[in-house]
Structure formats: structure tokens, C-alpha cells
Image (spheres, helix red, strand yellow):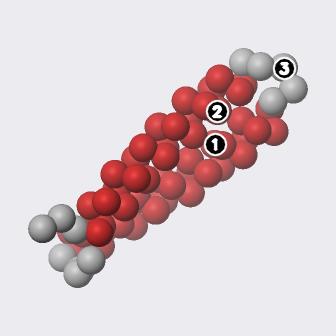
Amino acid sequence: MYSALTLRLWVSGIGILFCVATGIVALRMDGWLWFALALFAVALGLLVNTGWVAHRKRRGEPG
């Protein structure tokens, strides 16, 4: 059976890739700097979440 923590890792990883890629595209467009910075901030939050979930998964917590 699959773990909910594994699902959270996958969703977070996909979110990081999406936010970074979209942020890079937004940086190349005029007037979208605020959007790119917001996406990079979300990606940073997802990166922290990924680290925390990986830590919990290594400890063997249920979920």
C-alpha cells in the first residue's frame, strides 16, 4: 500500500518544478516580475515542505 507521505513528496516535487519553470518564463516577460517572485516564494515553501516530509518518512512515521 502506498503512503500518504509519498504522495505528498510527489505533489510537492511536481509543484516545485511547475513554479520554477513558470517563474523563469514570467521573468522573461515584461511587467511580470511580481508574479515570478511569488512563484519562487511558493517553490521555496514547497522545498521546505519536501524536506520536512522526507524527514518524517525516514523516521518511519505513519501516514
**Separation of disc 2 and disc 1 at Cα?**
6 Å
> Residue at the location (21% across, 75% down)?
59
Between residues 39 and 48, which one lies in front from this camera angle?
39
Q: Residue 23 carries which label?
A: 2
> Residue at the location (47% across, 37% down)?
17
**Separation of disc 3 and disc 1 at Cα?**
17 Å
Q: Would you name the residue on which mark 1 appears?
A: 40
Task: Give amino acid for label 2.
Answer: Gly
- State which quadrant residue 29 falls in: top right
Is any part of residue 58 visible from this angle?
Answer: yes
- On the image, the x and y values in percent for residue 52 come to 39, 67
Residue 8, placed above or below residue 37:
below
> Residue at the location (63% across, 42% down)?
40
Q: Is residue 16 found left or right of 32 in the rendered image? A: left
> Residue at the location (52% across, 37% down)?
18
Residue 6, placed above or below residue 14:
below
Mark 2 touches mark 1? (CB < 8 Å): yes
Between residues 8 and 38, which one lies in front from this camera angle?
8
- On the image, the x and y values in percent for residue 51 come to 39, 60
- On the image, the x and y values in percent for residue 60 come to 18, 76
- State which quadrant residue 54 falls in: bottom left
Task: Give amino acid for label 1.
Answer: Phe
* SS at circle 2: helix
- State which quadrant residue 28 falls in: top right
Is any part of residue 54 visible from this angle?
Answer: no
Task: Give amino acid for label 3.
Answer: Asp
* SS at circle 3: loop
Q: Would you name the residue on which mark 3 appears?
A: 30
Q: Is residue 10 found left or right of 34 in the rendered image? A: left
Sequence-wise first label, 3 or 1: 3
Q: Which mark is residue 18?
A: none
